[in-house]
Amino acid sequence: MDSIIDQTNAMIAQAVDAINLVVWSPVLVYLCLGVGLYFSVRTRFLQVRHFPEMLRLTFSRESSSVGVSSFQALSLSLSGRVGTGNIAGVATAITFGGPGAVFWMWLVAFLGACTAYVESTLAQIYKEECNGQFRGGPAYFIEKGLGLKWYAWAFAMATIVGTGLLLPGVQSNGIATSVLHAFGIPTWVTGAGLAVLLGVIIFGGVKRIAKVAEVVVPFMAIGYILVACVVVGFNFEKVPGVFALIFESAFGTHAAFGAILGMAIQWGVKRGVFSNEAGQGTGAHPAAAAEVAHPAQQGLVQGFSVYIDTLFVCSATAFMLLITGTYNVKGPGGAVLVNGLPGVDAGPEYTQSAIESVFPGVGAAFVAVALFFFAFTTLMAYYYIAETNVAFINRTLQKPFLVNVLRFALIAAVVYSAVRTAKVAWGLGDIGVGMMAWLNIVAILLLQKPALVALRDYEQQRKAKAPITFDPIPLGIKNAAFWESRHLDSKGPSDP
């Protein structure tokens, strides 16, 4: 019986790998970079020009009975971005791409800030009010902006499968693995506990999810970064060497890692997109839920969230691993290029070992707790995103029970994946990310104009120091029914 189970697991792993080779072909890797560069040029590098404005808007607390505040929307989107990818994902990128993968994660985040702006602004422009709350995202703006209902349904179905079934497994597996390593608690026990906690929150709706994220996300991110700073501080003399290692590896000039330059780019972009979500379209869903005076405002806030995720949290993990030497690197054919942790697979144990080197007896427990908060809030965000797409298809199907089907399916996926191997969990998660990225990137390339027009409109109003409003009709933006109605009523919120 055990041999049959092992053979079945091996076949599943091979099938997942084969699908990933197609979904995450080099075309998608370079498309993510190319689209980020393209939008950076089109917006005149708004991620640099509007950095102070991003900071100002980020801490807006303006909300309404149907919309969450910009800060809550940021926290909700960060709860999706800051997760297992920031700990185990960085470890995986370094293992298979070398230290140079970190540079490509930085680059895809810098350029991805503009991609995040475009998709999030489009989500705001074409959002709608549904059952007392704002709903929006790629499915909504594809239908309204492009008029392609079949394409909108394709994205909605891909996202329900991706965030409702495939991606949750990465988070629950990461939590279960780190808890097992730190406290010896069986993975099935952790999975069951996650199911109960998640059920309590997701059955409470988006407002409860946003309130939990608003408190937990800033706390966990700041605490993690502070610990990373202490670890780096104890090894401060090695910082220049780590920077040199990253850049030399990123461009193939390092003797040990020159042969895996292509893998550095692939894994850096792959894990960067998985973590910061720029281009996936997932961040656009919480962006649409925000109460703002102008769509461009939430677009800028979401652009800033990419910085927080990758340039701060992912970098914290990367520097802890590289500066303490607690990582492995595998080359072509499985050749071992670096063997800092013999026999340890890529995952949270890398970070646990790094912190243990400075705080003996503390590292494993700290990372397990941090990963729990990181991954659990990501599970909440995944549910919200999947629910938003169920709401989209329910406008046609009118099947309210589908929401409960989603809830139980996601909880079942969490329990199941907690006891699966990490490789299969990550493989399925990558398929989910790739499906959404392909569909979303094509859509925002076709529908970029409204987001770019909205940016110019917002910049002109700011320059004129006029009250911030948004009227889509004179801007030539059609089917933005919510904003048309708001402008006529003149009851929108004031600029924060």
Image (tube, rainbow, N blue to C red):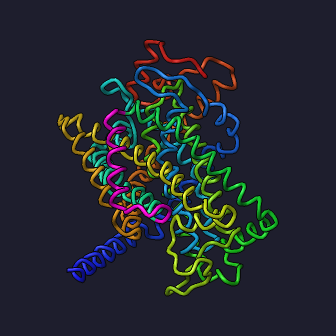
The N terminus lies in quadrant:
bottom left
> Is 184 in the magenta?
yes
Asked whether 249 or 489 is in front, the reply is 249
Residue at x 64%, y 62% (from the top left corner): 355
Q: Position of residue 452 (x, y in %)?
A: 55, 39
Q: Position of residue 111 (x, y in %)?
A: 60, 53
Which quadrant of the view contains residue 420? bottom left
Helix, strand or loop: magenta stretch: helix
> Is 491 in the magenta?
no
| Above or below 210: residue 263 | below
Which quadrant of the view contains residue 203? top left
Residue at x 53%, y 48% (from the top left corner): 115
| Magenta-drawn segment | 181-205
Asked whether 102 or 158 is in front, the reply is 102
| Above or below 440: residue 135 | above
Asked whether 297 or 471 is in front, the reply is 297
Asked whether 308 or 224 is in front, the reply is 224
